Amino acid sequence: MNRNISTWKPDGSGWRARIGVLTHDDSTISESELWTMAPDGVSLHTSRIFFPDLATFADPPGPENATELLARLPLQAIIYAWTVGSYLLGTAGEKELVSRVEQHSNGIPVLMSAPAATAGFRAVEAERIALIHGPFFTDDFDQKGAAYFQERGFEVVHVSHLLPPVEVPHPNTGSVATPAQIYEWVRSHVPSSAQAVFIGGNAVRATGVIAALEEDLRRPVLTANQVSLWYALRAAGTEVGIDDYGQLFKLSRR
């Protein structure tokens, strides 16, 4: 019996784009969120970096070795899922890290989550922003995050991190905060002056609350993994629209 190609079921093939993911070894959240959001024809391929502590996570040779493994695949982009790294390293340190890692990526662009958020804010034309961080952030990390985006020309009208605190590295319990906790924190802390919100921290499972928050707040909501996927799809030349995960993806359909 002859079969039309439309009868074949999705099989995970990356015929639209293949995206690599660099993530730390104590969390499953980035890759599972990215897989959940990825449209048909986009595949995700993960390489893990040992995470001893924040101070040494970016030190050689961990990121380089993980990248070399990914670079053996025919990828269009690699997401380095580490928002707080950009905050801690600052502009110069972030560029140095990306440049160093890209020496091992076989020409594949390496994209960090904070620059992705910067591009996302500009895409939704937001100038006044609110930053909500995971419970593994500290007051110092919050202020470094605010400084990071201020240096890029944004007015940060609010910054805070979820409570109660969670230690880093944290036990891999599947999530560091429930969707209800994230939703309530954002709803109660984001001021009306904010034109968009960024929920920072790739180990925060936050994509499931984007639609509800955007409906209630009536403004764009970005999360670390959501905006990283959006940015990687743009880098891969695959700006396909995605439902349910925020206004940002719908820009691809305009």
Image (tube, rainbow, N blue to C red):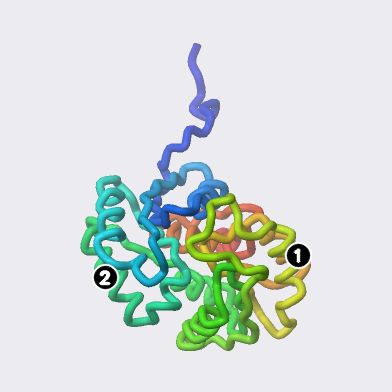
Amino acid carrying mark 2 in the image: Ser
Q: In the shown orientation, is residue 38 left or right of residue 58?
A: right
* Residue at 69%, 59% in the rendered image: 209
Q: In the image, which disc is placed on residue 143?
A: none
Q: Is residue 207 above or below residue 198?
A: above
Let me know if residue 73 appears in the view.
yes
Q: In the shown orientation, is residue 3 left or right of residue 101?
A: right
* Residue at 72%, 63% in the rendered image: 181
Residue pointed to by mark 2? 99
User: How far across and how far down the image is residue 165, in percent?
Assistant: 62, 69
Tell which circle, 2 or 1, labels the residue nearer the N-terminal end.
2
| Image quarter of residue 22 | bottom left
Residue placed most toward the observer, 212 or 189: 189
* Residue at 40%, 54% in the rendered image: 21
User: How far across and how far down the image is residue 38, in percent?
Assistant: 52, 49
> What kind of element bears circle 2?
helix
Amino acid carrying mark 1 in the image: Glu
Residue pointed to by mark 1? 215
**Crowd class of label 1 (few under 14; some 14 to 19; many from 20; radius 10 Å):** few
- Spatial CA distance of label 2 from label 1 is 39 Å
Q: Is residue 9 above or below residue 74?
A: above
Q: In the shown orientation, is residue 72 left or right of residue 2?
A: left
User: How far across and how far down the image is residue 199, in percent?
Assistant: 60, 69
Let me know if residue 254 appears in the view.
no
For marks 2 and 1, give the one nearer the viewer: 2
Q: In the shown orientation, is residue 32 left or right of residue 192?
A: left
| Image quarter of residue 198 | bottom right
User: How far across and how far down the image is residue 44, in percent?
Assistant: 43, 47
* Residue at 51%, 47% in the rendered image: 35
Residue placed most toward the observer, 40 or 94: 94
